[in-house]
Amino acid sequence: MATFLKDIKSKSEKKILYLDQNMWIYLAQVFYGKNKNPLLTDILTELQLLVKEDKVLIVINLTNVIEARKVIDDTRVIKFAEFVASLSKMYAFIPFPFIEIFEVDNILRIELGEELIDVRARAIGKGVLYLIHDGNPPRIEIQGKLIPKELHKEADKAVINHFTSKKAFVDFFLMKSDDSHLNETINKLEDIRKEGLKLRDKVFKKKLGVAQFYANMIIEKVALMCKLKEAHPSILRLNEGMERIMEVFKNMPLLYTYHILHRGLDEVPDHPIDTHDLQDIYSFCFPLPYCDIVVGEKYVIKLARKYQIDSLYDTLLFTVGELNPFLELLKEL
């Protein structure tokens, strides 16, 4: 899968770019004349040209929206959303849970010798439905029954037209969200991490971490896909040991990156997980392997480089402090 993903990237004429929230804010400030930084000005000029020439596709995700909603002044939120809409063309990648099943499908396809799914093509699309759903319009029901079959296409078209409109995109930024579910998740993750920190055997700790990850996130989906494909889970040969398990993990780029980013938090035991960390993990576990270029926070990029996510999946990484080489790359495109 890692090689397959590299091949997809090498053959694609359009580069997919992900910018962290700080970069979006800096560029919006330049766009509205609030920031005169010449380096940022040049970067925005290059990005606008590359987007216009269809050489670069800049994608966002739900975390970008959640961060923008924290601003109390609706006028500022609207201006930011309109800028994001103009530069991203409202393209986004679907939330984490909807991508997992594609990766599980692919690891089974590898063993079955079937053609692999282009996850990028499935995960990226235009409009609000890609920010909150799998990109497909929800089916409209009337009195508990589906509308007549001949009207499905018209209904789907109407829903898609609505959710791909600029108005729907900007309005979505203005919706206030409830983060209570994030706090509950964070508390559970922190309890698990604290228990893990008590282990002294690093090798065993690593094996336990991978085993927990597999058990919590993959087993159910593997069972589902095996049932659909009439295959047995043993086809993955996970009983062959740690090396084989890691091979399978690396063939699931999003899930492997998610695991690596969580593992990286253990390297700073005095830093408890917070909502910002969790949102960063959700934000970057797709872009780091699947995008061509990523500009992100220093600690995220540092972790990705340490565990060779960039070389494994052929992604160019930059921190916000490395904008000069980022600009040079844009000029080369």
Image (cartoon, helix red, strand yellow):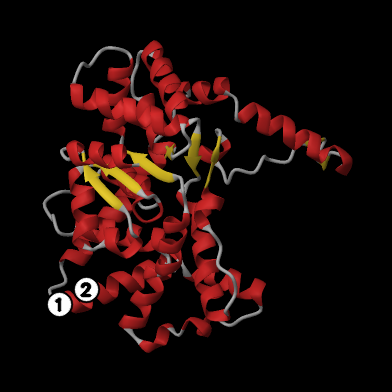
Against 29, residue 101 (above or below) is below
Q: How many marks?
A: 2
Q: Amino acid at mark 1?
A: Asp
Quick check: 314 above or below 211?
Answer: above
The mark found on residue 205 in the picture is 2
Front residue of this view, candidates 296 and 175: 296
Q: Are marks 1 and 2 in contact (CB under 8 Å)?
A: yes
Q: Residue at x 44, y 63 (%)?
A: 7
Q: Residue at x 32, y 54 (%)?
A: 315
Q: Position of residue 234 (x, y in %)?
A: 51, 85
Q: Position of residue 91 (x, y in %)?
A: 50, 36
Question: 287 or 50: which is nearer to us?
Answer: 50
Q: Secondary structure at mark 1?
A: loop
Q: Nearer the viewer, residue 249 or 215?
A: 249
- Of residues 291 and 185, the one nearer the viewer is 291
Q: What's the amino acid at mark 2?
A: Lys
Q: Pointer 1: what residue?
A: 201
Can you give x and y, in whole percent of width and height, for residue 224 in the image? 59, 69
* Residue depicted at 18% across the width and 37% down the height: 324
Position in image of residue 138 (x %, y %): 68, 40
